[in-house]
Amino acid sequence: MSDRYTVIFEGRIMPGKSAGMVKDRLKSALKTDGQGIAKLFVGSPVAVRKHTDLATAEKYKQVFAAAGAFCDIRKDGEPEAQAPMPPSVDSAAVADASNYSQSPAPPHQPPVSQVKVHYITTSDGGKMIITNIETVPGKTVAEHFGLVSGSTIRAKHIGRDLMASLKNLVGGELKGYTQLLQESRQQAMDRMIEEARLMGANAIVNVRFSTSSVAQGAAELYAYGTAVRVD
């Protein structure tokens, strides 16, 4: 029998997103009414979808991320949420909505061989561990500090735009945009790390990136994770 999973929503929304906006987007994406959405924001974990396959669970997570909210995927057998999702939610709508999401769903926890752990020097000369899974291999999480994030909004450069237009004629990598994205990722990471350092953390786990368009010719790159102290 294949593994089954449960999608959990705890009411957490992404920094910079308003609760009203997130609720409206979820109402549209899940094709439910205001009463159904209200049951998601009850102050305790809610099981959005139970006993489903991993691919379907990832679609739900992708839809919530696109709406500006966080949700988690738990393998069956782990502690479950307290309340079920109202039956008025259209499961088929989730599959449709996930096709239009601009924020890709974070992947399920990878095998240890694929884990990326980085040691970053902080502004005070210390070290911050950065990893894309929920734990640091070989270490024990002693304390959680909560969500930390960093973001930057960058606009296109007229020179890069001109070169990109020319490159469209012959094909190839748009190196100006590649450099812009690399700089944006680094700046967002630096800001996230500094926030975690000020909290007293020495590691950030479950690190993710997302992007969104905020204006004509300008986009935000957003880095976020969970600040912890490991021994």
Image (cartoon, helix red, strand yellow):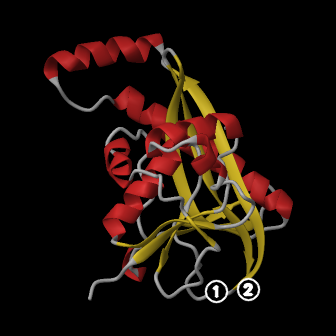
Locate residue 193 relative to residue 118 in the image: left or right: right
Relative to 21, is 227 above or below? below
Report the front residue among 79 and 167: 79
Q: Are marks 2 and 1 in contact (CB under 8 Å)?
A: yes
Report the front residue among 86 and 141: 86
* Residue at 59%, 83% in the rendered image: 79
Task: Determine which residue is flagged by label 1.
Answer: 139
- List x then y, in percent, for residue 52: 37, 71
* Residue at 49%, 88% in the rendered image: 77
Q: Name the quadrant containing residue 105.
A: bottom left
- List x then y, in percent, for residue 124: 82, 58
Q: Name the quadrant containing residue 112.
A: bottom left
Q: Which of marks 2 and 1 is nearer the N terminus?
A: 1
Relative to 74, is 163 above or below? above
Describe the element under mark 1 as helix, strand or loop: loop
Locate residue 13 relative to residue 100 in the image: left or right: right
* Residue at 32%, 16% in the rendered image: 163
Residue type at numbered disc 1: Lys
- List x then y, in percent, for residue 130: 60, 65
For the residues marked 2 and 1, what is the alpha-carbon distance in whole angstroms?
A: 6 Å
Report the front residue among 68 and 200: 68
Quadrant location of the C terminus in the rendered image:
bottom right
Q: Residue furthest left?
A: 170
| Number of the label disc, if any, that sits on residue 231 | 2
Relative to 5, is 146 above or below? above
* Residue at 42%, 69% in the rendered image: 108
Q: Does residue 115 show up?
A: no
Locate residue 209 relative to residue 231 in the image: left or right: left
- List x then y, in percent, for residue 141: 70, 82
Residue type at numbered disc 2: Asp
